[in-house]
Amino acid sequence: MALAATMRPLVSLALPEKGAARLATQLLLAIAGTLLLTLSAKTKVVLGPVDISLQTLAVLLIASAFGLRLGVATLLLYMAEGAMGFPVFQGTPGKGIGVAYMLGSTGGYLAGFVVMAAIVGWAADRGWDRHPVKLFNAMLVAEVIMMAMGFAWLAMLIGPEKSWQFGVLPFIVGDLIKVALAASLVPAVWSLLKRA
């Protein structure tokens, strides 16, 4: 029993044990997560030839803090908001909205975010969120899979060479920085909580 208690993600510290209060708290956290994802999508950092959003950083942090089930549920809620036409994605509303936008050039990356949340959330549920190296490895795998999904989808639309040149290569350094940052932040929070 003690082992199971130590292998829960950060959010478990804030959740009521059971009942309607637990469900309501999870719902509020999921909504807050979608707001964070929206803000991160709209926040751009200039790093080299392209503007990079903070969205992958937000996905990694949400999945690490929320764990598999709540993390994936949050990403699915975010996708549902986007599908309904809310301007939650980086290029919305300027480049379209709703399902049409989701099936455009960023479709593979958006689907990859859900897979990314599942991988990192799974790792957090197993206590990897307390160890920077383990968490970095899980996040790196999740990042590579997300980028591969984005590349594959984009390659169907514009071809593999352009997909690599415009959809992967310019983002490698920035995404590695975001993975390293997220893999450092979450274990640091656990360390602070242990001292408190």
Image (cartoon, rainbow, N blue to C red):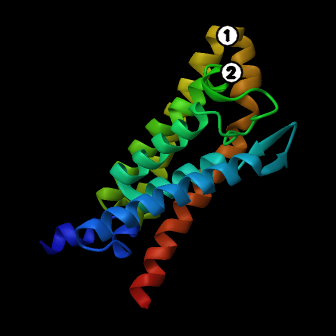
Q: Looking at the picture, how far across and down is residue 50, in whole percent?
A: 84, 37
Question: Residue 131, relative to residue 111: is it above or below?
Answer: below
Q: Secondary structure at mark 1?
A: helix
Q: Looking at the picture, how far across and down is residue 164, in whole percent?
A: 69, 20
Q: For this rendering, which residue is in front, 125 or 27? A: 27
Q: Residues within 10 Å of mark 1 (few under 14, many from 20)?
A: few
* Label at residue 157: 1
Which residue lies at the image location 56% right of the left edge and 51% below the top edge?
34
Question: Residue 24, relative to residue 68: is it above or below?
Answer: below
Q: Looking at the picture, how far across and down is residue 141, in whole percent?
A: 46, 40
Q: Looking at the picture, how far across and down is residue 101, in whole percent?
A: 67, 25
Amino acid beneath label 1: Leu
* Label at residue 98: none
In the rendered image, which quarter contains the N terminus?
Answer: bottom left
Which residue lies at the image location 18% right of the left edge and 70% below the top edge?
3
Q: Is residue 70 visible?
A: yes
Instruction: Answer whether labels 2 and 1 touch (C-beta < 8 Å).
Output: yes
Amino acid beneath label 2: Ser
Which residue lies at the image location 49% right of the left edge and 48% below the top edge?
139
Q: For this rendering, which residue is in front, 70 or 119? A: 70
Dot placed on the residue nearer the N-terminal end, 2 or 1: 2
In the rendered image, which quarter contains the C terminus?
Answer: bottom left
Q: CA distance from mark 2 to mark 1?
A: 7 Å
Q: How many marks?
A: 2
> Which residue lies under the disc numbered 2?
105
Q: Residues within 10 Å of mark 2 (few under 14, many from 20)?
A: some
Q: Is residue 141 visible?
A: no
| The furthest residue to the bottom | 196
Question: Residue 158, relative to residue 43: is it above or below?
Answer: above
Q: Secondary structure at mark 2?
A: loop
Q: Quadrant of residue 97?
A: top right
